Amino acid sequence: MKYKLYNCSSWSLARLLRYKEQLSQAMEKLARRFPGDIAVLDILQDITSGRHEMWLILDEQEEFIAFLTTELKLTLEGKKRLNLCQLGGRGGTVLAQFLPQLEQYGRDHGASEICPVGRIGWLRVLGQLGYKPEILKYRKDLTHG
């Protein structure tokens, strides 16, 4: 099956509403999976404020597969970076085929680097595409002993 990535920043509300249920479910699932780090309201505020852009991955019939949010941000060194922030839906590894498109988008908007944020499970796939891990986040539950 073929998929396509769409930047939704110029989409009308009517066009977006077609995916309301699937987007809601994907965002809620993501928030449940990472309750200490992600909240649906925060995702929505980032998108509606313009801090993040929302992208949709759709299949050949334009049915929802996943959503992605990105942000262009200046680093402390003054470099522009395209951050890939949240990814929710199904078939997350489908995103890998769109990394060249996202990299070009970053270049077109003056970014000198791209930085996906993701689970350790992405290490192999991203490594094959030239990405290197920069930081690992460790966590320990202090409430159980």
Image (spheres, rainbow, N blue to C red):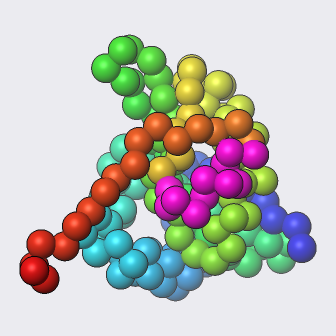
Q: Nearer the viewer, residue 4 or 121?
A: 121
Residue 136, x across and y down, in percent: 40, 49
Identify which residue is drawn at 47% across, 23% down.
80
- Of the 4 image quadrants, the one containing the N terminus is bottom right
Eyeballing the image, is 27 above or below 127? below
Identify which residue is drawn at 58% across, 75% down.
89
Q: Is residue 63 visible?
A: yes
Residue 32, x across and y down, in percent: 35, 81
User: What is the number of callouts on the image?
Assistant: 0
Overall secondary structure of the magenta stretch? helix
Report whether 53 appears left or right of 36.
Answer: right
**Residue range corresponding to the magenta coloring:** 118-128
In the rendered structure, does residue 140 fall within the stretch colored magenta? no
Identify which residue is drawn at 81% across, 65% down.
3
Residue 36, x across and y down, in percent: 24, 69
Eyeballing the image, is 52 above or below 16? above
Report whether 105 appears left or right of 1.
Answer: left
